[in-house]
């Protein structure tokens, strides 16, 4: 703040400086998410447990008879760890898209918040942060179900919430970006069917990417979900190696990129 | 608060066109104008939710948009459109905004209670917003905007679409703010609202201020002391209208009558009619024209 602007203004002595990405602003925005979460946590928790259970039952009972081992792992080991990524994807990309669109366009919640001392960067960062924290926690659900199905506990599983958090941060940012550019909420169908569904199938969740044709394998390499699956699997089964550093780097880069993209795209539409 | 040479364009539409406005501390300032005059765009610019293409804006001594976050900390906003979280209770919403406005932790509960009292929603504190009536929701919006006891309050069409009872209640609330020395900027297209509450009124049309003064001052200048209302059948009214424009009198349609402004200056040539004191509506129509876009 320059001396001239201080003397020119009629402001009171030593106004409190307000900076970028203030913890108080992030906490304020997130306190709203927490209050809303208090209303629907039961439904969220229910589906996060039931969904992997169904996957494990269906694939475990159905396919394990045909394919007893996959990539040297039992099917429970393979699927329980793979489905973590699916859980993270669904609990971050969808809230990123739908919650953002509804709060922005229908409820105008974001308009209300931006009239308070919160800027676009803080608003979107807080929303993405909340979604990804939640995704990190709920990403553990498939592992818990896996443990019930006979998966061996491993100390590396403690890293899974962190991996889920970073991956969820990227996909939440991706969801916010989609919400920002979508004209209507129906446009989300294009993204769900053409981007998210193939992404979750070509990630090594249910079958190995290495069995796929060359071209598809290349695509898997740029799929953040593939890197999430690999990292979760290696961590949970105590098999972390140097390749996992690359997986982690891809996830971090994806998170960073999507975060900035979300702020840029939604910011341009929130402030006209 | 001051705005100088402010311009905002949306494509080929110029919403705000060289706006000049100064609002001194401690007054209740009414921004009056027809729909589409640029009032809401101006209000959004004051919170930097709309960025001006040209011109300078400063609020509470802070330069916008650079220091807008600091100015937003010290002012409260009551929006025209309901943007409450329908899934939360009154108390939860107020608590979230107490945090957003940086009310210290120890004072938050008190601030929430005070806002509930302002909104007269004490017994409804734990009701979900979806279950509140329209008037209650508007009162909650006001309480939310005042949660941090701001020294400047922006009210964008505060009583649009409300019952007369709720409107009266909000008016006394706004009057109470002014009595406490809070600066109030209120946009409205209800003339009565501006006339009753505002110390100073600025009339906005086509994105600029076309007249400014106390309500009484504006009436005197643009409508005179008295208005003569001439009633009659349509062809009689057409005659009167022709007579008025022929004689250079300023006149306007007023429902089933023709109202001739500045009637105190008319001598014997005035047609038969009912004389009444001029009001702000007369001045407003004289200023902004009768045509509706």
Image (spheres, grey):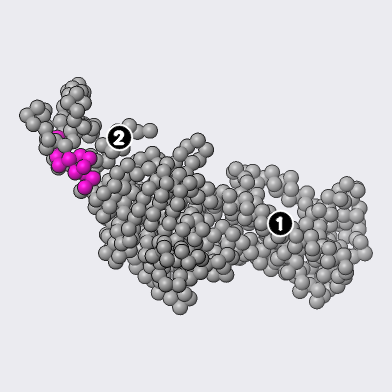
In this figure, what is the number of numbered marks? 2
Do discs 1 and 2 belong to a common subunit? no
Q: Residues within 10 Å of mark 1 (few under 14, many from 20)?
A: some
Write down the quadrant of residue A189 in the picture.
top right
Q: Is residue B282 above or below residue A251?
A: above
Quadrant of the image for the N terminus of chain B? Answer: bottom left
Residues shaded magenta: B217-228
Q: Say the numbered circle drawn on residue B289.
A: 2
Q: Secondary structure at mark 2?
A: loop
Horizontally, is B252 left or right of B16 in the view?
Answer: left
Residue lying at 47% horizontally and 37% vertically, measured from the top left = B13
Q: Residues within 10 Å of mark 2 (few under 14, many from 20)?
A: few
Residue lying at 66% horizontally and 67% vertically, measured from the top left = A133
Q: Alpha carbon of mark 1 to alpha carbon of mark 2: how far?
A: 53 Å
Write down the quadrant of residue A168 in the picture.
bottom right
Q: Is residue A55 visible?
A: no
Horizontally, is B167 left or right of B75 in the view?
Answer: left
Residue lying at 8% horizontally and 31% vertically, measured from the top left = B267
Residue labelled with disc 1: A257
Residue A100: image location, x then y, percent: 59, 54
Residue lying at 71% horizontally and 60% vertically, measured from the top left = A255
Q: Secondary structure at mark 1?
A: helix
Horizontally, is A175 left or right of A245 in the view?
Answer: left
Extreme residue in the bottom direction: B106
Horizontally, is B254 left or right of A199 in the view?
Answer: left
Image mark 2: chain: B
Residue A264: image location, x then y, percent: 63, 53
Residue A139: image location, x then y, percent: 72, 65
Q: Say the numbered circle drawn on residue A167.
A: none
């Amino acid at each position: 703040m320059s001396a001239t602007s201080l003397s020119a203004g009629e402001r009171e002595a030593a106004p409190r400086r307000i900076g970028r990405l203030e913890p108080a602003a992030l906490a304020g925005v997130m306190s709203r998410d927490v209050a809303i979460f208090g209303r629907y946590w039961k439904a969220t928790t229910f589906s996060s447990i039931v969904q992997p259970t169904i996957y494990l039952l269906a694939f475990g009972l159905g396919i394990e008879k045909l394919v007893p081992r996959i990539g040297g792992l039992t099917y429970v080991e393979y699927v329980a760890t793979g489905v973590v990524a699916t859980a993270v994807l669904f609990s971050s990309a969808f809230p990123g898209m739908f919650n953002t669109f509804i709060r922005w366009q229908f409820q105008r919640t974001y308009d209300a918040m931006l009239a308070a001392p919160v800027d676009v960067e803080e608003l979107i960062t807080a929303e993405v942060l909340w979604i990804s924290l939640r995704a990190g926690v709920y990403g553990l659900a498939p592992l818990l179900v896996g443990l019930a199905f006979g998966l061996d506990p491993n100390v590396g599983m403690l890293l899974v919430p962190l991996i889920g958090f970073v991956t969820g941060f990227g996909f939440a940012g991706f969801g916010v970006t989609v919400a920002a550019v979508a004209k209507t909420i129906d446009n989300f169908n294009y993204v769900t069917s053409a981007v998210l569904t193939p992404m979750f199938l070509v990630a090594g969740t249910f079958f190995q990417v290495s069995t796929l044709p060359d071209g598809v394998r290349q695509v898997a390499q740029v799929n953040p979900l593939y890197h999430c699956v690999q990292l979760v699997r290696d961590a949970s089964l105590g098999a972390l190696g140097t390749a996992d550093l690359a997986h982690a780097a891809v996830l971090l880069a994806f998170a960073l990129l999507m975060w900035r993209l979300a702020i840029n795209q939604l910011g341009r539409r929130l402030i006209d | 608060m001051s705005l100088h040479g402010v311009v905002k364009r949306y494509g080929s539409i110029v919403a705000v066109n060289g706006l000049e406005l100064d609002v001194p501390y401690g007054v209740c300032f009414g921004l009056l104008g027809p729909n589409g005059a640029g009032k809401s765009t101006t209000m959004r610019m004051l919170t930097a939710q709309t960025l001006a293409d040209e011109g300078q804006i400063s609020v509470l001594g802070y330069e916008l948009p650079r220091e807008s976050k600091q100015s937003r900390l010290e002012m409260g906003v009551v929006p025209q459109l309901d943007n409450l979280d329908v899934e939360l209770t009154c108390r939860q919403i107020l608590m979230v905004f107490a945090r957003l406005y940086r009310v210290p932790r120890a004072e938050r509960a008190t601030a929430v209670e005070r806002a509930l009292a302002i909104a007269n929603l004490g017994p409804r504190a734990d009701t979900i917003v979806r279950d509140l009536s329209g008037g209650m929701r508007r009162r909650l919006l006001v309480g939310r905007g005042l949660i941090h006891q701001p020294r400047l309050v922006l009210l964008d069409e505060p009583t649009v679409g409300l019952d007369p009872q709720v409107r009266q209640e909000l008016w006394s609330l706004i009057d109470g703010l002014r009595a406490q020395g809070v600066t109030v900027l209120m946009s409205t297209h209800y003339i009565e609202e501006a006339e009753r509450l505002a110390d100073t009124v600025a009339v906005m049309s086509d994105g600029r201020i076309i007249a400014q003064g106390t309500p009484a001052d504006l009436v005197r200048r643009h409508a005179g002391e008295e208005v003569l209302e001439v009633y009659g059948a349509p062809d009689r009214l057409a005659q009167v209208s022709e007579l008025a424009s022929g004689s250079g009198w300023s006149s306007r349609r007023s429902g089933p009558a023709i109202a001739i402004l500045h009637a105190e200056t008319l001598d014997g040539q005035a047609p038969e009619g009912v004389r009444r004191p001029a009001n702000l509506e007369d001045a407003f129509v004289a200023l902004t024209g009768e045509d509706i876009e």
